[in-house]
Amino acid sequence: GQTNVDPKGYLTSLSNTALTSNADVGDINKARLLLKSVRDTNPKHGPGWIASARVEEAAGKIMQARKIIQEGCEVCPTNEDVWLEAARLHPPEVGKRILATAVRKNPNSVKIFLRAADLETNDKAKKAVLRKAIEVNPTSVTLWKAAIELEEAEDARILLSVAVEKVPHSVEMWLALARLETYENARKVLNQARRALPGERAVWIAAAKLEESQNHDYMVDKIIEKAVKSLLKRDAVVSRDQWLQEAEAAEHAEAPQTASALARHTVGLGVDPEDRQRTWADDARGALARNAVATARAILGNALAAFPHKKSLWHQAVELERKRGSAASLDEVLAAACERLPRAEVFWLLRAKERWLANEVDKAREILTEAFAANPDSESVWLAAAKLEWETGEAERARVLLQRARERASTDRVYMKSALLERENKCFKEALALIEEGIKNYPEFPKLYMMGGQIHSEDLEKNKTSLDRARKFYERGIQKCPTCVTLWILASRLEEKASAYVATSTAKAGVTKARSLLELARLKNARNPQLWVEAIRLERRAGHDKLAITLMARALQECPSSGLLLAENITTSPRVEQKSKSADAIKKCPDDPLVIAAVASLFASERKNEKARKWFDRAVVLDSDLGDSWAKYYAFELGVGSKEQQSKVKERCIAAEPSHGELWCSIVKEMANRRKSVGDNLELVAQHILQQKQGTILN
């Protein structure tokens, strides 16, 4: 009768069977009976014979297994799996004879021929078996591939030339033959392949790559254009995404011209007109993320050809060239952007800056001259031109340019830069005259009052006259700009240091005046963390630690989620409280770079260097423009890191070009440091941090 045993499924369960007990023996006997029933019921069912043989093999009765499988071969002479099992159960020499019989019974069985070749121990015999197999099965791609793999290059080429005649539908064969041929012959082979497989894109792409290998770039574009048209005409189903994947694959195979051509000719397929800009911008970003620079560049080139006046696309193209292109390719893109968008001053300025950084000062001047023609009233262009002359030591040229700027494109920043130039050249009288003129025209621009106060308090002789004039500047500034926190802070610091200007004034009186100013500032600017921190630091500098603690408590009540205050609280708290203050700060501001940097400094002080490094890294990632975080990170690496780790942090900082941060700005904006590079300034600020740390330890 029929049985419910599934012989195929049963084979799997026998793979790791081993007899370990009487129960196992009982199971084997049951299996024998079941499988005998299967063989008797359906003797032509090959899996039943294989399962029976494996039961005997698992029971350790190899001779019985061989006997059963031989009987299976006689009963099922056309079942290739039974013959293969028989070969497996016998020694190799016997297995060869079994397979020789098998191929006579099953001349079209590729599996049997491949197994017979595997049993041969030398390549000559293997080749003989496979050649015989190919004679009988000339259309088997698998057999051709196995035979070709055994041959040397020249013999493989001969075999492949026969193979493509016998199996013209195999793309792999055509492409393999083309790779082994000379350029001229490879062209002929690929042309034949195109005729045999008119709907196969891989052949067209291979032809383009072949031309690229010979530097025939004009042919690459022609082939890809023809390929896309030909496949569309034949209704070959190749989606836009598949084409772009082929472009990226070509680029990774070191065929950037082919990749570019593929992207150019296919990126627009099936995209709605209204979605083109967004889709292409996303495509370029995706390709760049997968390291396909040439593909991304081609996509953006196509997008810019369709949307030549889209500023965002030009920005994307410039960013690509800055990060992944050469100086020449960046200049080319910037030149094109300036041509298409002459009123977009940012591209002129970027181009001039790149030329200046490459020490091509005259070229930078030319670019800015063109920028003037397109943007005669642009503050940024005038200031960039003045900066170029200023930085290259041409102070007089810079002065003339700034004078013209004040006449033709007057702004508050133009006056500020004009005064700064005079201050840097120690022409304080001229600087103050420009500041007064600027204040007259722009009375609500706080930086002019700041600079006037700083010239009197820092640059001129320290006496009562300088003190009074500096005060006057800050008072005027505060009246006109009561919400400018920096002016209040500068005024309070001036009062704190008043005793350095006037012999009769005491430090205590200076602190009292400074405190009053800061209290008035907080009344006019409620909930301002900077003013609270300044007040707290004033008391600490004056030695009033208890008052500082009280102020901190009030400040945190008024500004509970201020990263600046929380970071200050961590730094100034007693050692035993710092851990709990850190946990509280992280809970309130988990992504504030000031808090993260303060916690990193705490780990560093506890010599938990790996944790500190991880937290410093997080701080600079959260806000790469914050110079204080970079300086603390670099100071930490100078103390405990290797030369490699130090240079890595320095390189990242230089690339980020930070411009903010309380300590960073206070040092970088000193007149002596204005011309220094980002790397030099990083060294200065880091050394300042290390000296402060050393002073704290000594105290």
Image: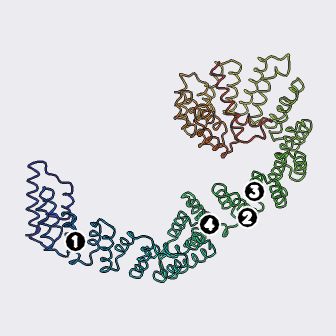
- Give the number of the disc on residue 4: none
What residue is disc 2 on? 336
Amino acid type indicated by mark 4? Ala
Question: How far apart are the two marked residues, 3 and 1, measured between alpha carbons?
Answer: 74 Å
What residue is disc 4 on? 298
What residue is disc 1 on? 99
Find residue 276 and report its horizontal and vertical position in percent.
60, 68
Q: Earlier in the sequence, mark 4 or mark 2?
A: 4
User: Which residue corresponds to the image point at 89% horizontal and 35% vertical from the top-left?
Assistant: 428
Find residue 71 and report its horizontal and vertical position in percent.
12, 70
Split into 4 quadrants, where in the image is the C terminus?
A: top right
Mark whose residue sits in front, 4 or 1: 1
Mark whose residue sits in front, 1 or 2: 1
- Badge 1 marks a residue whose secondary structure is helix
Task: Kindly check if marks 4 and 1 are in contact, taking CB atoms under 8 A apart as contact.
Answer: no
- Give the number of the disc on residue 351: 3
